[in-house]
Image (tube, rainbow, N blue to C red):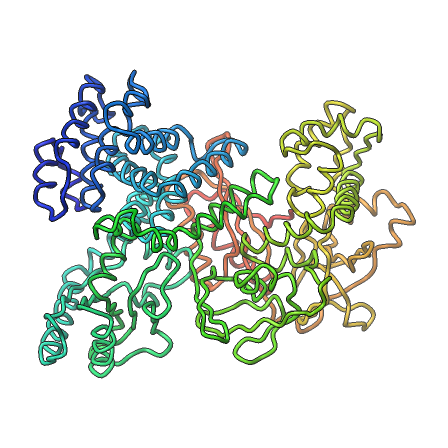
Amino acid sequence: MSEANVQKIITIEDLTQKILSTEKRYDLSKILSAYNFANQAHGDQKRSSGEPYIVHPLSVAEILVDLGMDTDTICVGLLHDVVEDTEYTIDDIRKRFGPVVAMLVDGVTKMTQMPIFDKEEQQAGNYMKMLLAMSHDIRVMIIKLADRLHNIRTLNYLPAHKQRRIAEETLKVYAPLARRMGMSALYEEMADRAFKFLDPFAYSEIEHVLLLKKEKREAFIQAIVERLTERLAQERFFKQPPTIYGRVKSIYGIFDKVYLKHKSIEEIYDKYAIRVIVSDQDECYHVLGIVHSFFSPLPNRFKDYIATPKANMYQSLHTTVTSKEEIPFEIQIRSWDMHMSAEYGIAAHWKYKEGIQKRDRLEERLAWVRKMIEAQQTSDDVEEIVNIIKNDIAKEEIVVLSPKGDTFTLPIGATVLDFAYRVHTEIGHKTIGAKVDGRIVPLDYVLKMGEICEIITSKDPSKGPTRSWQQIVQTNEAKAKIRSWFKRERRDENIQQGRASLEQEFRRCRMHVPDEEMTEFLQDVLKRHNCGTLEDLYASIGYGGISVAKIMPRLKDQYVKKYGQVNETEMQELPIVEPAVPDSQNYITIDKIDDIVYKLAKCCNPMPGDDIIGFVTRGHGISIHAKSCINYESAVKRAIPEELARWMAVRWKDSIKAAKLPTSIEVVSVDRVGLMFDISRILMEAHVPIINSSSRQLKNGNAIVEATVQVDSTEQLQGLMDKIRRIRSVISVERARK
């Protein structure tokens, strides 16, 4: 998968030569027959580059040969666009090449026909089709990844809007899929190429930094390789001499850590890496001992992925050390088997001639696909199904141990409740406490790499989860199991809870629908979420399968069309405040009473330096608003005594000065490349954490950037906003009130 492959137009002679040069045995006559059929079917069709269309199937087939795939898969690489782009059908493929090739072509065709980013309903269905195709035969996804890799290699021939759409799909879905399947070579190339189209300014800046230090970097890596080669040559322990080489972290990998995880270049210890490849596992640990005696290891920078492999079955020893020049770098130690698995992932099954016969190992690698399919079964919310799949693919992972020494892989940010449900569904349901490394911890404790977690369960057979657990767990697997329990065990309670939630939201928005008209009014929602009756809808809302907040915008529009305009001022009145809990860092006081239950209102995001006022909610403590909040100003203007009586004086404690609270800013600017980078750089230099950010283009050609950051005062926020105002092309910077 070298750069040379990108520039060269491959021919059938090139593909044949590559096949003959491999050690793998192929049915060359079947592959040539597939080529002739595809070449005749595509005829005079051209690609956007002007090349004959057959160049694309040939290139896909070449990538699949590099991956070591079998004869049928190579044939599908050549035939994968025939059914979609020509007059031939799946039956034609089946008659000529058999049922396996036809099944794989059909799977790839269906996947190609479904756009990843589309309307919510189509999105969810398309993701599910993709997962089901993968679970049926993973070769479908491997072919699709090869297809996407060649497409993004030739993306520069397409119009700008298509470039951006395909690059975004690649970076958000296909590249993470390749990583989850353990195919690091595909992942790094797809991520780098997609990133280049999505943010060419940041790409070129990182590329420029790498080029500036290229000679120095290469000399440094070469010196380390030579020193390590000389040292290991003194050992007689090895069956054959270790292979040692250096590599530089990918451009997107550097961007991910510098700009998304807010690290400086100096903090990226693995930007330089040395790989040592040996014969077996024993030699890996032998090399590790030599490395630690030869270089100075950095504390807490050693990871043993051999003893505890990643979820994609990646195995290697990672240790960060410093050279005599005190430059930190990473050394990765692995066997040849581990190396092939790391580079080719699931495809290594075919490269090793294991194929689909080794179902046990293949099933283990694909367990995460089944878990995602199971997780979405309990959700009636279309958007959530999409998020389940996107998030479960993309998240980085940690390994947590049970007291017996069993290892469990969880995404970063997972809590002890997530761990309990990962161990077993019933253990999760009956959890009443947990110990981490021997210490009692709360259920929302966030686990860290290598910790030992012990779950304490109840012996009460009626014990089950509480609704608040939905906010504690982070994995979609655990959320699905909790939803499933409530769906199965608490239908009457769910109906009551769901009806109350929907009625509360209707009241908040000043929407009144007569009871006798409710079923008709909600008919579209019932159909959209596959609910047969109103009670089914209430039950789905009650157990968390449907989010009220997500269905309300459409219902508001529907209400206006049916019953007339809603008073917008009244609709803005007071947003629902999430159930409040006492905060161990309590920063609000009322008449010298410190231990109060409160939430900072999201409509105005009050922060230290703002004059604040408290609103007594019904059952959820006190909602803290800025006095400039539209909700407070509207209440004063309406001057209703009963309503004004619920507002009360509150103030910040002095201890708030040590806290960092979230607030949002809106930046309006002339749209240009690098705008997000310039804003992020100012926030990063000020050591201000960015909770989330987004941008969108306005109709007038300008762009608006919204960012939620953590600051300790209005003074610090004002200073940041002043700096952002000085950025080229920025028109205005305001503090967001919603």
- Judge left or right: residue 138 versus residue 125: left
Residue 510 picture quarter: top right
- Residue drawn at x 43%, y 49% is 727
Image mark count: 0
Q: Please provide percent x and percent y for residue 519.
A: 77, 29
Residue pictured at 84% horizontal, 29% vertical: 514
Q: At 66% from the left edge and 52% from the top edge, which residue is drawn? A: 485
Rendering quarter of residue 405: bottom left
Q: Is residue 12 above or below residue 261?
A: above
> Is 151 situated left or right of 485 in this image?
left
Q: Position of residue 240 (x, y in %)?
A: 10, 70
Considering depth in this image, is 377 or 567 the residue closer to the camera?
A: 377
Left or right placement of residue 651 versus residue 670 in this view = right
**Which residue ends up furthest to the right in the rendered image?**
641
Considering only vertical position in the picture, is 382 above or below 52?
Answer: below
Residue 135: percent from the left, percent from the top?
41, 43
The spot of residue 621 in percent (x, y) is 78, 60
Asked which quadrant contains residue 51, the reply is top left
Instruction: Judge from the rendering whether residue 513 lies leftward or rightward of residue 474; answer left or right.
Output: right
Q: Tell me if residue 52 comes above or below residue 693 in the rendering.
A: above
Name the one closer to the observer, 120 or 310: 310
